[in-house]
Image: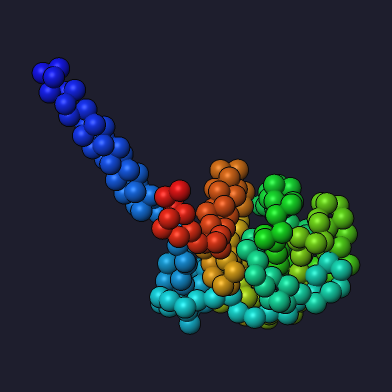
């Protein structure tokens, strides 16, 4: 037996090395990074979606917008071009879920302070009340970084349309006198560079903020340089 092993030692070692290489190649080829879903209106709770969109299954994107931020500057999609961003809806005098949501946005801002690829965007649902001056005072109080985070206001119709038809993030109030009345939710939305919704998160829950930060890392892999077959191996 010993003589047989000695005779075929080189062959056994070669087979072992080849088997290891083959297993490594298979692992590299099958090791596909996770990918976030692309949310379509039909995937979202119907109470958050305008009735005209509830059964849309594909091609949904955030519509073009033009709003005013805390510095009185016009903010459009051009300011978020080639950026990943987190969006939400709030109002400055809210005493229920908004303070917690804002604190979590501050946490995200802090965690991603040096990441130039990610920005934040908060829309007031009380645009008549939350003027740029009011938003500026709120921003200063909360420590908002103007270079990373816009708090925006605009016409009530523009905010309502974005909330219901783009971000799919607020509840309608059809029984009120004003057709544009809405109830904002705790949702944070993760938006990719193609203006698509890639995730919904409860902005009041620590665990969801952790999940959001993890998902941002996953989303960023979609924009990383693609490795060739040989780069994956070596």
Q: Picture coordinates of residue 173 (x, y %)?
A: 58, 72
Say left or right for 112 vs 208: right
Q: Picture coordinates of residue 133 (x, y %)?
A: 89, 67
Quadrant in which the N terminus is drawn: top left
Q: As rendered, which of 22 and 56 lies closer to the eye?
A: 22
Q: As rendered, which of 171 and 49 lies closer to the eye?
A: 49
- The residue drawn where x is 17% and y is 29% is 8
Q: How many marks?
A: 0
Q: Farthest residue in the top direction? A: 2
Say left or right for 167 vs 178: left
Q: As rendered, which of 227 and 220 lies closer to the eye?
A: 227
Q: Picture coordinates of residue 200 (x, y %)?
A: 53, 59
Say left or right for 130 vs 54: right
- The residue drawn where x is 67% and y is 59% is 118
Q: As rendered, which of 171 and 18 lies closer to the eye?
A: 18
Q: Can the viewer see residue 174?
A: no
On screen, 65 above or below 47? below
Q: Quadrant of residue 171?
A: bottom right
On screen, 96 above or below 55? above
Q: Can the viewer see residue 31?
A: yes
On screen, 125 above or below 144? below
Q: Quadrant of residue 180?
A: bottom right
- The residue drawn where x is 21% and y is 34% is 11
- Indicate the colouring scheme: rainbow
Q: Picture coordinates of residue 103 (x, y %)?
A: 72, 48
């Amino acid at each position: 037996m010993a003589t047989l092993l000695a005779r075929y030692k080189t062959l056994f070692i070669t087979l072992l090395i080849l088997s290891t290489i083959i297993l490594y190649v298979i692992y590299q080829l099958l090791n596909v990074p996770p990918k976030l879903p692309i949310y379509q209106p039909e995937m979202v709770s119907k109470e958050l979606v305008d009735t005209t969109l509830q059964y849309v299954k594909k091609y949904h994107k955030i519509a073009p917008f033009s709003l005013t931020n805390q510095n009185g500057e016009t903010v459009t999609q051009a300011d978020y071009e080639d950026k990943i961003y987190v969006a939400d809806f709030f109002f400055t005098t809210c005493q229920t879920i908004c303070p917690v949501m804002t604190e979590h946005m501050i946490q995200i801002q802090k965690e991603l302070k040096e990441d130039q690829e990610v920005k934040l965007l908060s829309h007031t649902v009380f645009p008549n009340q939350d003027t740029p001056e009011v938003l500026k005072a709120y921003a200063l109080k909360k420590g908002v970084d103007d270079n990373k985070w816009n708090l925006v206001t605009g016409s009530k119709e523009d905010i309502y349309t974005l909330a219901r038809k783009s971000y799919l993030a607020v509840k309608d109030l059809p029984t009120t006198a004003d057709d544009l009345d809405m109830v904002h939710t705790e949702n944070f939305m993760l938006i990719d560079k193609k203006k698509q919704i890639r995730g919904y998160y409860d902005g009041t829950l620590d665990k969801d903020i952790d999940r959001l930060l993890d998902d941002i890392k996953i989303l960023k892999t979609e924009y990383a340089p693609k490795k060739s077959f040989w780069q994956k191996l070596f």
